[in-house]
Image: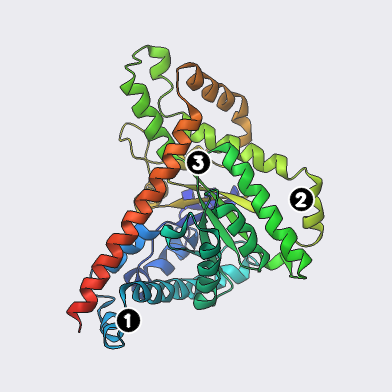
């Protein structure tokens, strides 16, 4: 099949496109394979909200729910069984991509229970459990970048498990994530593990930053034209400056030593790239974040928009650092407290995932009862 010209152009520019969605229907119907064949999809990401939608829609899970109910499974164990089955199946669909790219792509992410985000030991335990249960080389275990999650990231990587670090909003936290990743690789090296088999991405959230800062600009009644022009600029500026940190990391002796031992780069992954403000382009958070060694994880609506009109230019992330610095400086002058924004967004992101997880457990519990 022929790849879409716009998604192929992104792929050729060094941007891996991963679908931010997964369901059993998508796997069984062949839709996931179709997106791989026609829209340059080379990976899949999931989260509790995605699983909530998948497991509570349609009838694809009815047979397994009946079997789990008959076996006396509770909601928590049932969710783990169903989600790991889906991720394993998606890993198998993407296995040819994984093999063709020597592990660079072809990845499927599964997230630890978000209620464990503030407990290092329990996060590590479940991350190892999920990796063992999926039992595929191309799985990525998602761990939130909370303060308690940082040491968990290091410990899981040291055990040879590939990790998707999620819910990163701030540049300072991203630096901490890089340190946790390097520490994990150093731990893996000390245990004699093959570093070339351990992969990681760092998921930097984009559009939510604009949503929060735009709301603050409006709430403060900052109606001056120069301040209104700052709307919609923070998310992309923040992400691009994270890429500058990524580039700087590659010039460190710490990284060079690991690279010489076979380590692979932890790529920046642009998450939350669906446009939430209808005044902005629906491909804003794709076209503005083009650079080598990056991943953009797209909800299906955004992927379709990119395939329809996502023409990219020669402009790349490193071309804009001076402007990005100015944008964040100007926001600070306008009274926007960067630290307050990113702290709030991390807390809200975790709260949303915990809420989705609890709703999922409640729904599955009801369905298990109905199948008894």
Q: Which residue is mark 1?
A: 73
The residue to which callout 3 is attached is 169
Task: Report if residue 316 is visible in the image.
Answer: no
Look at the numbered disc 3 and give the secondary structure of its residue: loop
> Local crowd at mark 2 within 10 Å, few (<14), some, or many (≥20)?
some
* Corner quadrant of residue 84: bottom left
User: Is mark 1 in CB contact (under 8 Å) with mark 3?
Assistant: no
| Sequence-first tag of 3 and 2 | 3
Residue 51 or residue 75, whichever sits in front = 75
Q: Is residue 201 above or below residue 188?
A: above
CA distance separating discs 3 and 2: 23 Å
Q: Quadrant of residue 160?
A: bottom right
* In the depicted structure, whether residue 45 falls above or below residue 307: below
Q: Residue furthest top?
A: 224
Residue 201 vs residue 11, the one in the foreground: 201
Mark 2 or 1: in front is 1
Q: Secondary structure at mark 2?
A: helix
Quadrant in which the C terminus appears: bottom left
Label 3 crowd bin: few (<14), some (14–19), many (20+), radius 10 Å: many
Q: Name the one closer to the observer, 288 or 57.
A: 57
Residue at horizontal 42%, vertical 38%? 344
Query: Where is mark 2, residue-wise?
Result: 255
């Amino acid at each position: 099949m022929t790849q879409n010209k716009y998604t192929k152009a992104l792929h050729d520019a060094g941007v891996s496109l991963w679908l931010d969605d997964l369901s059993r229907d998508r796997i069984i119907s062949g839709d996931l394979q179709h997106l791989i064949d026609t829209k340059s999809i080379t990976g899949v990401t999931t989260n509790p909200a995605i699983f909530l939608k998948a497991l509570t829609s349609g009838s694809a899970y009815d047979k397994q729910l009946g079997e789990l109910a008959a076996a006396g499974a509770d909601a928590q164990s049932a969710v783990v069984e169903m989600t790991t089955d889906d991720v394993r199946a998606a890993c198998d669909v993407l296995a040819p991509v994984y093999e063709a790219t020597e592990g660079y792509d072809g990845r499927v992410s599964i997230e630890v229970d978000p209620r464990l985000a503030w407990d290092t030991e329990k996060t590590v335990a479940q991350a190892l459990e999920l990796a063992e249960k999926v039992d595929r080389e191309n799985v990525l275990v998602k761990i939130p970048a909370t303060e308690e999650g940082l040491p968990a990231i290091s410990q899981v990587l040291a055990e040879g498990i590939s990790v998707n670090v999620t819910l990163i909003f701030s540049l300072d936290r991203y630096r901490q994530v890089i340190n946790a990743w390097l520490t994990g690789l150093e731990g893996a090296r000390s245990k004699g593990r093959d570093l070339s088999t351990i992969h990681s991405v760092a998921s930097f959230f984009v559009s939510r930053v604009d949503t929060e800062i735009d709301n603050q600009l409006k709430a403060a009644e900052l109606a001056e034209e120069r301040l209104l022009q700052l709307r919609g600029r923070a998310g992309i500026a923040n992400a691009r400056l994270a890429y500058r940190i990524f580039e700087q990391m590659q010039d460190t002796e710490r990284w060079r030593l690991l690279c010489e031992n076979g380590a692979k780069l932890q790529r920046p992954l642009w998450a939350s790239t669906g446009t939430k403000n209808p005044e902005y382009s629906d491909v804003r958070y794709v076209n503005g974040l083009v650079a080598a060694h990056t991943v953009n994880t797209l909800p299906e609506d955004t992927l379709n928009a990119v395939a329809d009109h996502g023409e990219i230019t020669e402009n790349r992330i490193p071309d804009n650092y001076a402007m990005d610095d100015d944008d964040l400086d100007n926001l600070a002058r306008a009274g926007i407290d960067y630290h307050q924004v990113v702290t709030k967004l991390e807390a809200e992101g975790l709260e949303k995932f915990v809420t989705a997880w609890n709703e999922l457990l409640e729904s599955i519990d009801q369905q298990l009862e109905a199948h008894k």
